[in-house]
Image (cartoon, coloured by chain):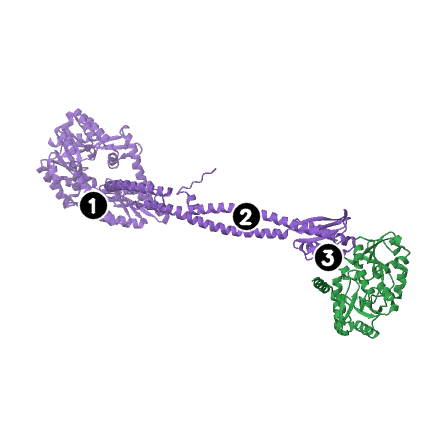
């Protein structure tokens, strides 16, 4: 009897565990880093997953995580067959787990992105050096490539060390810009497209904000396959992704994914990122 | 305060007449409105208060909830989440806005629901507005409830949540609820009012109406029907009392009606008598009026009416710009008719004259009697030419004799004519001038005369004479002339007729013809006759003392004989001159002697007793009654000179003279012929047996000295012839 009860409990528990958390050979898992909240992320990329599924003949599911730590656990376990992650995570995943970049984002028609420092227009800051002693908020944690590493790089290159300003962190880049707008920080470290994001310019008057400094253009957010992915399959997936903007369906999928396109990317394009990571975080990949 | 009466005769009674039912329904409706209105208002206030409280409660719950979930986003700078909170809150019902503020009052959210009316109105206003400005603008609206909730975490103030709540929906809902409540209240009030009215009408109004109908019947006089007693309440008691009252009233009314019937009968009798008396009075009044304005004898308009018609004729002529004629006429020899045939005949003659005149004139003409034998005629629209035609016609109708008591009376008329406006423009002037014209017509014996201003002086002179007459006797302006009367058989002067003459200090000798009628009209004739008699007696005395045995004849007027006062004075005078009475002959006219007057007869009889001889003067021209002549105590008759003068050429006159002499002699009377103007006449008279004669052939009237000379001369020649 005890055995029967234990067996029943096991069945119930197993039934409660999401199917997509069970890696099987038949399921192709598309992992997306938590750039946005969970629901939004699933909605944005489910059409792409369906499309991809149809193309590769396998069931494709989208997985994301509520935070970077959980997501990173999926990376480290090579759970994701195809993963969309930030530049820092890719460099690190390549170095540690053999992920290979096959494509990168094209947003607002650009496949590159720069780190930027946002301030209010009515502030008297003329250069990054004016931020000394000020409160700077970054749109993510220290692993956020666009919202922390790249803006910090601008600070370092301006001669400001960590002790020269007060670091604050919001949960994403738009909130960093909003915090500056709401006078909760003097400057915000974020990407150079943050003011173009609807989540920002629909909430506030972005004319009251300005980019105090913008870094060099760097390859945009990457899409990578795991190490075990066969080269033929890698190419097929790369072909599917980069040819999305060639069909009506693909453009619709891209629009839902808030992208203007996916372009082919090589690992070499992320060497620039590796240098900045080493410069800011002191980590070598 | 003004007291407005509501009596039935007051205009307010009809203007403000409202039935009892309407008043009661209005009162009930008023009470229901007040009651239900108070309840509705109370309910409205309670519901509004509860709704408001629920609104506050809603705001509190929402605000506290946002305040409780906001610390994490605030601390993690998750403004998107905060914005999501306020966005969701802002879309709640009644919520206008929700904002999250930092401890420094900086906005941490940017969302405002632009679809909200308040927000929309605020951002529509010109200018650049921050979220704080917009929120402040919204809060200025009195219908906005502003609520704040602090955001505290572990005693750390992280800011606050501010919520703006609109009362508009609640207020609108309350208003709708109130209207709904009022609507149903009105329905209920109407329903209740109708129900109460119906009950009131059946239980109260109906008995009252029956009482009113009963009262109306009583007012119409129907006291037989009684009002049905419906209920045993106060109205029932009132109905019983009413019926008892009607019963008593019925009895009383019957008694009153009976008395009234009797009274009406009496009234009818009284009315009949009054009507009869009124008719009599009307007739009498009419008769009096007729008498007042008409001549009693002829029925013609009298002097008053003539004057009135004359005034009307003047007015009408002025209005029509045309003339009219006034005629005055009197009858020639009417006085003789009156004196000889009596007043009865004279009156009948006047009636006939009036009838003839009336029949001879147009119906629009007026003929009236002024008095005596004077008539006036008004001819409207008639000028001088036509007036003469009318006058001729009138003169002509007098050619036909008037038959009275078998006697054919020939009388003439004299008509004076005055024309308006050429002879006068007022009544008195016109009458005076018509009178003048009539006087001229009479004097000239021409029938009629149209007024001529040249003739008016005679009238003036006549009037002046009338004035002078008063003083003539006192001024010794009168003298007596004496005309001898001889006895034809002997040729002796046996008598002299005393004839008065007036020597006017200005106008000289005036004939008696001109002033005797005036004296008769003015009443001076009595005074004159006394003066003549006195003077005659003095002359008689003088003649006696001078040895002349000659009698005196003195003329008396009919007016003297008719005046009792004069008669007494005459007798006194005769009494004092008794010795001369045998030689005195009083001559009175035929008409005076023949007057059917006992008084005159008595007077003549008394004179006869005093041995005074009476002679009938101007005999033959009047209407002497032989039977009366026989009875009268007269001594002689004096044939009118017109017959004596005419007997030489007119056989009729000769016959009359002879017949008169014969008749007088047959009656034992002496006959005097006057107017003997020649010897031939004298001879005839002698041949006819006339007793005495008088005339210019013998001697004209002589002054006393001349008379004495004449007598002396005659007596001397007589003596010579005897010798």
- x 26%, y 32%: residue: B502
Image depth: mark 3 or mark 1 in front: 3
Q: Secondary structure at mark 3?
A: helix
- x 67%, y 55%: residue: B92
A239 and B410: which one is in front?
A239
Inter-mark Cα distance, 3 to 1: 146 Å
Residue placed farthest to the bottom in the image? A232
The chain coloured green is A
Where residue A203 sits in the image (x, y, percent)? 75, 58
Is B34 situated left or right of B468 in this image? right
Q: Secondary structure at mark 1?
A: helix
- Determine which residue is flagged by label 3: B84
Is B81 situated left or right of B412 in this image? right
B157 and B97: which one is in front?
B157
Where residue B131 sits in the image (x, y, percent)? 74, 53
Inter-mark Cα distance, 1 to 2: 112 Å
Q: Secondary structure at mark 2?
A: helix
- Residue B478 position by quadrant: top left
The quadrant of the rendering that contains the N terminus of chain A is bottom right
User: Few, some or many C-alpha atoms within 10 Å of disc 3 (few <14, some 14-19, many ≥20)?
Assistant: some
Where residue B72 sits in the image (x, y, percent)? 76, 53
- Determine which residue is flagged by label 1: B352
- Up the image or down, B88 lies above or below B10; here it is below
Inter-mark Cα distance, 3 to 2: 43 Å
The chain coloured purple is B
Circles 3 and 1 on the same chain: yes
């Amino acid at each position: 009897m005890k055995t029967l009860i234990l067996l029943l409990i096991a069945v119930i528990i197993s039934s409660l565990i999401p199917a997509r958390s069970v890696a099987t050979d038949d399921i192709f898992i598309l992992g997306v880093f938590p750039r946005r909240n969970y629901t939004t992320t699933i909605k944005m990329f489910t059409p792409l997953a369906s499309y991809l599924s149809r193309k590769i003949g396998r069931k494709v599911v989208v997985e994301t995580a509520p935070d970077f730590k959980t997501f990173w656990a999926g990376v480290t376990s090579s759970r994701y067959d195809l993963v969309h992650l930030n530049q820092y995570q890719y460099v690190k995943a390549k170095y540690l787990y053999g992920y290979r970049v096959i494509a990168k984002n094209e947003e607002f028609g650009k496949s590159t992105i720069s780190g930027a420092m946002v301030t209010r227009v009515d502030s008297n800051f003329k250069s990054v050096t004016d931020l000394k002693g000020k409160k700077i908020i970054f749109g993510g944690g220290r692993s956020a490539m666009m919202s922390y590493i790249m803006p910090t790089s601008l600070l370092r290159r301006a001669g400001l060390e960590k002790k020269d300003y007060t670091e604050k962190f919001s949960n994403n880049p738009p909130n960093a810009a909003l915090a500056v707008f709401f006078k909760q920080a003097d400057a915000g470290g974020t990407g150079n497209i943050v003011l173009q994001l609807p989540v920002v310019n629909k909430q506030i008057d972005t004319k009251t904000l300005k980019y105090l400094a913008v870094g060099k253009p760097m390859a945009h957010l990457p899409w990578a396959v795991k190490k075990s992915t066969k080269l033929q399959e890698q190419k097929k997936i790369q072909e599917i992704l980069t040819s999305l903007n060639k069909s009506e369906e693909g453009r619709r999928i891209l629009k839902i994914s808030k992208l203007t396109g996916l372009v082919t990317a090589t690992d070499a394009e992320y060497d620039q990122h590796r240098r900045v990571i080493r410069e800011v975080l002191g980590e070598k990949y | 305060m003004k007291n407005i009466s509501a009596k039935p005769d007051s205009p307010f009674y009809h203007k403000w007449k409202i039935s009892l039912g309407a008043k009661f329904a209005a009162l009930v409706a008023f009470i229901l409105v007040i009651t239900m209105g108070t309840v509705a208002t109370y309910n409205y206030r309670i519901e509004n208060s509860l709704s408001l409280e629920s609104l506050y409660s809603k705001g509190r719950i929402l605000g506290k909830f946002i305040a409780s979930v906001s610390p994490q986003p605030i601390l993690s700078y998750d403004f998107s989440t905060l914005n999501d909170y306020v966005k969701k809150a802002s879309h709640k019902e009644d919520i206008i806005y929700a904002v999250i503020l930092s401890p420094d009052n900086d906005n941490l959210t940017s969302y405002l629901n632009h679809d909200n009316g308040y927000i929309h109105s605020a951002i529509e206003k010109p200018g650049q507005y921050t979220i704080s400005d917009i929120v402040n603008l919204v809060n200025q609206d009195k219908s906005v409830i502003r609520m704040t909730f602090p955001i505290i975490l572990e005693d750390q103030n992280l800011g606050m949540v501010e919520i703006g709540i609109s009362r508009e929906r609640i207020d609108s809902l309350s208003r709708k609820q109130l209207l709904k409540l009022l609507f149903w209240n009105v329905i209920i009030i109407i329903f209740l009012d109708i129900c109460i009215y119906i009950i009131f009408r059946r239980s109260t109004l109906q008995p009252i109406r029956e009482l009113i109908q009963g009262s109306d019947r009583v007012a119409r006089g129907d006291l037989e029907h009684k009002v049905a007693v419906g209920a045993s309440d106060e109205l029932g008691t009132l109905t019983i009392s009413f019926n008892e009252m009607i019963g008593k009233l019925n009895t009383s009314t019957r008694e009153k009606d009976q008395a009234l019937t009797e009274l009406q009968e009496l009234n009818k009798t009284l009315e009949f008598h009054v009507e009869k008396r009124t008719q009599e009075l009307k007739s009498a009044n009419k008769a009096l009026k007729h008498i007042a304005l008409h001549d009693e004898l002829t029925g013609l308009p009298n002097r008053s009416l003539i004057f009135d018609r004359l005034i009307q004729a003047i007015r009408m002529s002025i209005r029509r710009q045309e003339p009219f004629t006034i005629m005055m006429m009197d009858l020639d020899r009417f006085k003789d008719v009156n004196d000889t045939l009596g007043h009865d005949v004279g009156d009948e003659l006047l009636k006939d004259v009036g009838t003839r005149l009336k029949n001879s004139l147009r119906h629009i003409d007026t003929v009236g009697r002024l008095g005596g034998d004077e008539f006036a005629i008004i001819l409207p629209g008639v000028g001088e030419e036509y007036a003469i035609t009318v006058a001729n016609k009138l003169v002509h109708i007098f050619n036909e004799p008037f038959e009275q008591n078998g006697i054919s009376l020939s009388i003439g008329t004299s008509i004076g004519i005055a024309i308006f406006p050429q002879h006068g423009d007022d009544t008195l002037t016109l009458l005076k001038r018509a009178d003048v014209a009539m006087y001229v017509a009479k004097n000239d014996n021409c029938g009629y005369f149209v007024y001529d201003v040249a003739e008016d002086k005679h009238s003036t002179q006549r009037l002046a004479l009338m004035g002078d007459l008063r003083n003539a006797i006192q001024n010794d302006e009168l003298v007596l002339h004496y005309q001898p009367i001889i006895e034809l058989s002997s040729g002796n002067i046996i008598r002299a007729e005393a004839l008065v003459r007036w020597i006017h200090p200005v106008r000289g000798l005036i004939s008696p013809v001109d002033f005797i009628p005036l004296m008769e009209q003015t009443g001076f004739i009595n005074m004159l006759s006394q003066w003549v008699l006195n003077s005659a007696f003095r002359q008689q005395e003088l003649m006696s003392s001078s040895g002349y045995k000659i009698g005196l004849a003195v003329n008396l007027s009919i007016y003297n004989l008719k005046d009792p006062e004069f008669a007494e004075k005459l007798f006194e005078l005769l009494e004092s001159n008794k010795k001369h009475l045998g030689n005195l002959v009083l001559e009175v006219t035929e008409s005076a002697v023949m007057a059917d007057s006992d008084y005159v007869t008595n007077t003549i009889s008394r004179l006869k007793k005093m041995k005074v001889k009476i002679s009938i003067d101007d005999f033959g021209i009047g209407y002497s009654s032989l039977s009366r002549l026989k009875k009268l105590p007269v001594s002689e008759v004096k044939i009118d000179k017109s017959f004596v003068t005419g007997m030489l050429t007119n056989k009729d006159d000769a016959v009359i003279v002879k017949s008169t002499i014969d008749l007088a002699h047959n009656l034992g009377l002496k006959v005097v012929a006057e107017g003997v103007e020649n010897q031939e006449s004298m001879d005839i008279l002698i041949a006819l047996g006339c007793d005495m004669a008088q005339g210019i052939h013998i001697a004209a009237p002589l002054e006393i000295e001349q008379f004495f000379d004449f007598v002396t001369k005659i007596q001397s020649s007589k003596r010579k012839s005897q010798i």
